[in-house]
Image (cartoon, rainbow, N blue to C red):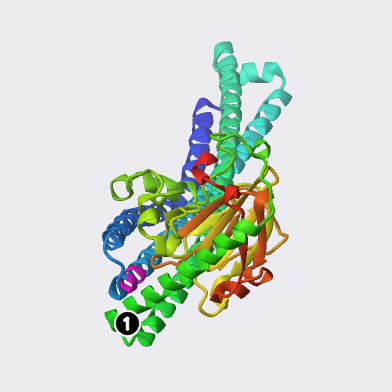
Amino acid sequence: MSRTRAVLFLFLSFFLFAGVHTAHAQSAADLQSQIDANNRQLETLKAEIVAFQSQLDSISVKKSTLQSTISSLTLSQRQLATQIQVTQNKIASANLQIQRLTLSIGDKEASIATDQNAIAKALRTIAERESVPLIANLISSNSLGEAWQLTDETLQFNRALADNIINLRTVRIELASNRDAVSKTKADLVSLQSQLTLQKRSVDASKATQQKLLSDTKSQESNYQKLIAQKQAAEKSFEQELVDLQGQLNLIVHPNLLPKVGSGVLSWPFSTAYMFNCTGRKTLFGNLFCITQYFGNTPFSTANAQVYNGHGHNGIDIAASIGTPLYASLGGTVLGTGNTDLVRGCYSFGKWVMIIHGNGLSTLYAHLSSIDVTKGQQVSTGQLIGLSGMTGFATGPHLHYGVYATEGTQIMTLKQFRGATTACANATMPVATLTAYLNPLSYL
C-alpha cells in the first residue's frame, strides 16, 4: 500500500461521511426555518394576549353593567382562543424539533457505520500487510524508513477513525436525549392544549348563560340592575339566616390544633404562571395576588351590609377569568361539592368544592364554572379541582377562597334547623361557627 493509496483511502472515508451529512442538510434547514417562523408568530400572539388582558382590566374597574359583563366574556373568549393557538403553535414547533433531531441522529448513525466500515477496511489492510514477511516489505519499499513510516501512518489513521467513532457515539447519545426531552415537552403541551380547550368550553357556556340573561332582561340595562338588586336582597336574607344558624352550632374550635399563623402550609389555588402575572398587575389591584376583597371587616363588606350583613367577608376574593384552572392548596380529601344555583332563588356559593386537609384546616373554592372532583376523592397538592367562574352571588368572574377550622365546619342544608325560610333552605353548603372562619392569608 503506497502513501498515495493511504491518502486516497482517507479522502474516500471523508467523502462518504460528508455525503451522508449533505443528504439531509437541506431538510434540516427547512425544518429549522419553520421552527423560527413559529417562534416569530408566538411573539405576536403573546402580544395579543397582553392586549386582551389590558382591555379586560379596563372593564373590570368599571361599574358592573349588562354590556360590560358581555364584553368581558367576549374578550375572555378571544384571549383564550389566542392562548390555545399559542399552545398549538408550540406543539407544532416541538414536532418540527423532533423531526430535525431524528434527521441529525440518522446522519450520525450513518456516519458511524461509514467510519466502522473504514476501520474494518483499515484493519484488513493492516492484517494483509502483517501477513507479508518483513523482508518482502523491505524489498518493496524504497527504504527501511519508508516502510516504517507507511506502517505508522496506517496505525495513526486507525486511531483517528476510532476516536471519531467515539465522538459520534457521544453526539448520538446527546441527540437521543434531546429528542426524549422534546417528546416530553410535546406531551406537556398536548396536556396544556386539552386544559385550554376545557377553559374555552367553560367560557362558551358562561357566555351562553349571559346571552340568556340578555333575553330574560330584554337587553335592557334597567332590567339587569333590577335583577342585581333582587340578588342582593336575597343574599341579605340568606346571610342573616346563616348567622342565626351559626349561633346554634355547638362546635368548638381549638386554636392550638391549627397550624401556626404564617407557616405557609397552603399554596395559592392557581398556577405559578397565573400568580406571577398578578405581580405585574399590582397597580390595578393594589396587591401582588389579584385580590379584589380581603378577609374580615373590609371597607367593602362594612359598606355593603346587604351583602355581608356587616359581619365581614368570610374569605378572600381573587380575580380570575372564567375557565381559569383551580388547584388544591394542599393534599387531602374532598369533603363535599355542590351547586347552590340548583335551588331556585338561592344566591350563594354557586358551584363549590371543600377539601379537608388533615391538619385542622379545610379550604373552600366557590363560584366555580366547572367541578372536576367528587366527594370522598383523595387529591394531592396542586391537583386540578375545577375552573373558576361566576356562579352563585357573583356579578363578575372571580374565586371566593375560604379557609376554615375543620372542627367548626359542617356541610348541611339550612332546613335542618328550625326557622330556615329563605330560598337557600334546601341548598347544601358548608356552614361554620363564627370562630371557624380563618383568614386565608394567615396560611398562604
Magenta span? 69-73
Name the residue at 55% across, 67% down.
351
Q: Amino acid at mark 1?
A: Asn
Q: Which is nearer the eye, 170 or 258? A: 258
**Going by the image, does 349 lie left or right of 285?**
right
Give the camera-side residue of 393 and 435.
435
Q: Main secondary structure of the magenta part?
A: helix
Residue 252 to residue 391: above or below:
above
- Residue 359 falls in which quadrant of the image? top right
Query: Would you place residue 44 above or below residue 5 in this image?
Result: below
The residue drawn where x is 47% and y is 54% is 311
Q: Nearer the viewer, residue 11 or 53?
A: 53
Residue at left offset 52%, top offset 74%: 346
Q: Which residue is the site of mark 1? A: 223
Which residue occupies 26% across, 63% down? 62
Residue 243 is situated, as x and y percent measured from the top left of the image, at: 55, 60
Q: Position of residue 273 (x, y in %)?
A: 44, 48
